[in-house]
Image (tube, grey):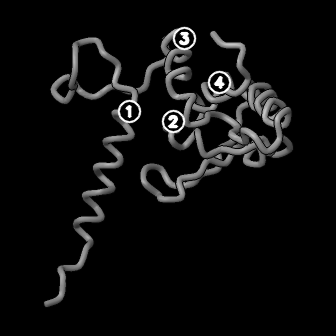
């Protein structure tokens, strides 16, 4: 799997939150509360899931504690708790090696080669729903 504490924590967090990569990338060390066993994820633009606080299951606490310790080793340099912008490819490789895949689109909605995993299908689907909602609620221009 991986020996990198941030990637291991990101994979664990993806399992218990169901959050998208873009949301995992918002977490900072201060977003994990060890005493309360909670993790806050953010979506300031409210583009997909909105901000949320998640209970951390006991099995995942060790991964998040390790990621916090790792982030503190280089203060001010890389303050991402779970994933930085450059970690997407590595995280997908780790998830694929562990055979952990997100929900896939129905057969009729799949794009690309058969068997290809669409990692961002859920994110794109939520974004399209959000864009549709915004378009529907826009006021017509006044003349």
Cα gap from disc 4 to disc 2, whole angstroms: 11 Å
Residue 51 drawn at (x, y percent): 57, 54
Quadrant in which residue 8 is drawn:
top right
Q: Name the residue under label 1.
A: 120
- Mark 4 Cα shell of 10 Å, populated few (<14), some (14-19), many (≥20): many
Residue in the image at 59% along x and 52% along y: 42
Quick check: marks 2 and 1 in contact, CB under 8 Å? yes
Q: Nearer the viewer, residue 15 or 1?
A: 1
- Along the viewing direction, whichever of 22 and 109 lies nearer the viewer: 22
**Which disc, if any, is residue 21?**
2
In 3D space, how far apart are the residues under numbered discs 3 and 2 (Cα atoms)?
Answer: 17 Å
**Occupied quadrant, residue 3:** top right
Q: Mark 3 points at which residue?
A: 98
Mark 3 or mark 1, earlier in chain: 3
Residue 86 percent coordinates (x, y): 56, 31
Quick one: label 2 or label 1, which is nearer the N terminus?
A: 2
């Amino acid at each position: 799997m991986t020996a990198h504490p941030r990637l291991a924590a990101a994979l664990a967090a993806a399992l218990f939150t169901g959050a998208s990569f873009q949301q995992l990338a918002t977490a900072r060390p201060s977003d994990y509360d060890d005493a309360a066993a909670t993790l806050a994820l953010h979506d300031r633009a409210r583009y997909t899931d909105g901000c949320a606080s998640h209970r951390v299951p006991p099995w995942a606490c060790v991964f998040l504690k390790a990621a916090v310790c790792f982030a503190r080793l280089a203060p001010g340099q890389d303050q991402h708790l779970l994933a930085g912008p450059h970690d997407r490819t590595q995280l997908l490789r780790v998830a694929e090696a562990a055979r952990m895949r997100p929900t896939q689109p129905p057969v009729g909605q799949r794009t690309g080669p058969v068997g290809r995993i669409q990692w961002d299908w859920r994110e794109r689907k939520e974004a399209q729903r959000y864009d549709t909602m915004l378009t529907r609620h826009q006021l017509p221009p006044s003349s």
